Amino acid sequence: MKKLFLHVVLQVVAAVLFSAGCHENIEPSKPSSDGAVVSSNCIDCHTNYALLKQIASPDTSTSTGGCGGDAPHIETYDKVYLGGEGFELYKKSMHGTVGCVWCHGGDASAIEKKSAHAKNFIAHPSLQAEKKCIVCHSEQAQSPTSIHAQGWGQKNMVTVRYGAQSYTQIPEHLQKGYDVNCGKCHATCGDCHINRPKAGGGGLYKGHAFMKTPNMVDQCVACHVSRGGHAFLGIAPGTVPDIHRTKMNANCLTCHTGMEIHGDGMKYEQRYSVKALPKCESCHANIAKSNVYHTQHIKDLNCQTCHAQEYNNCGSCHVGGEGARVPSYQGFKIGVNPIPETRSYPFVTLRRSLMAPDSWKEYNVPVLTNFDAKPTYKYTTPHNILRWTKRTEVASGKSCYDNCHIIKEGTAFRNKELYLFNSDLESWEIQANKKIVVDGKLPSSWGVQ
């Protein structure tokens, strides 16, 4: 009985909102004062492809690529066109029932584009998620403190290296530089559930259909292309897709829950501190006793140290200038754990990150005065897992450690390239990475110090 009552209430509310906003009783199109054909309401206009091509204006949210390259170009009128199977699904959904004005504002009765887009029109409602999305989706909606939306980890890196106590204390011009360059991939609700992300070209994804589950390639990988998707799908030369993809057809949401992505209301300044992060042990029970290698190393190494393939690296980025001066390359390094307060392993996989002392030169910060406070190689968990890798698969008759321990052969050291030494660093990186290089920290029996 309660469910029936709730259903009736929702229908009444929807009807009221519907009558106040867009409706499907479309009046005939009327000519404007300049002779152009215009729509008498939202749907009439946005389903008229020829009209949209005539009157479309530049998108208010610029589509920009990131570390994965330039965003694909999509015409402005294609970004706002309502059509196809997705639009039919939208019309039948609750979102379609409540009408356009409920989310976008504007004047649904106007016959001129300028008038229709008046009355506090909002092109991208999920930029005001706390007023638009969270009102109805309080349990699912992205928290304002979500690391996925806000990029607190990146902001914290910039803050510490600049020498400030909080992100709000760094200069406005540096914050602007962050928003234009680093912040452009961090997602709103709409970027995952209605639109293509900006890095994927922007605009409506499926005719305004609301996708409960984002598309892995078109939404997730559009932003996480340079490392996450690149690794998981096995795109790099010499790599193959992650075993979780090939064996169980896993996608991002197989492991990454809505709670992790949307946020739990807490502000985390390091993404590995997020409580809802997936753990290998959640699926791989009793892993510590499953074989002799695990028994010996389960507390010493993160899982990726043995089971990840080579991973995408780049570095020394000149933000707003010439970009990455250490071009993208596939590599693999083991070093001392840079976040022991968050992850307890002594040795872990590392990837080279973007920052250099003069990275923000174009934004009036010639040198980051506290640059050495953070290493340029970061703790990493590549999404390119295999059971048998170059380190776990040894030749017949060889010791289990033959491909991962450093072994002296004459005057040379085999496997040394797997580890991060001072000799691997640019001169300006040495001080920043002094705590995580392995110089003097490996077993003396290996003979390399």
Image: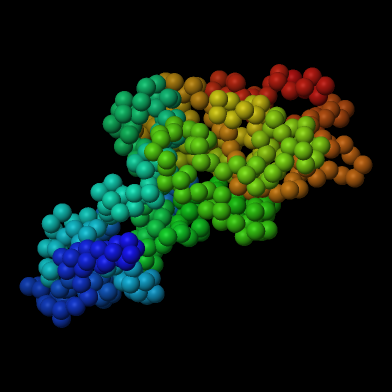
Q: Residue at x 55, y 47 (%)?
A: 227
Using the image, determine if residue 52 lies above or below residue 261: below
* 66 relative to 33 in the view: left or right: right
Q: Position of residue 147 (x, y in %)?
A: 42, 40
Which quarter shows the C terminus?
Answer: top right
Q: Residue at x 71, y 34 (%)?
A: 298
Query: Height in image: 270 above or below 231?
Result: above
Q: Nearer the viewer, residue 37 or 228?
A: 228
Task: State the residue at coordinates (52%, 35%).
Answer: 272
Q: Measured from the top left, where is residue 64 in percent x and y?
A: 38, 51
Q: How is the image coloured?
A: rainbow
Please state which of residues 217 and 367 is positioned toward the viewer in this rendering: 217
Please tell me in which quadrant of the rendered image residue 441 appears.
Answer: top right
Q: Is residue 75 visible?
A: no
For the view shown, which residue lies furthest in the right direction? 397
- The residue most toward the bottom is 28
Q: Residue furthest left?
A: 33
The quadrant of the rendering that contains the N terminus is bottom left
**Residue 439, quarter of picture:** top right
- Residue 406 vs residue 214: left or right? right
Residue 419: give x, y in percent of width and height. Answer: 69, 31
Question: Is 389 rendered above or below residue 449?
Answer: below
How many marks are shown on the rendered structure?
Answer: 0
Whether residue 92 appears in this view of the structure is yes
- Residue nearer the viewer, 260 or 197: 260
Residue 182 image point, x, y percent:
40, 41
Image quadrant where residue 168 sits: top left
Query: Residue drawn at (49%, 21%), measured in percent from left and top?
Result: 373
Q: Please state if 31 lies on the left or on the right of 333 as rendered.
A: left
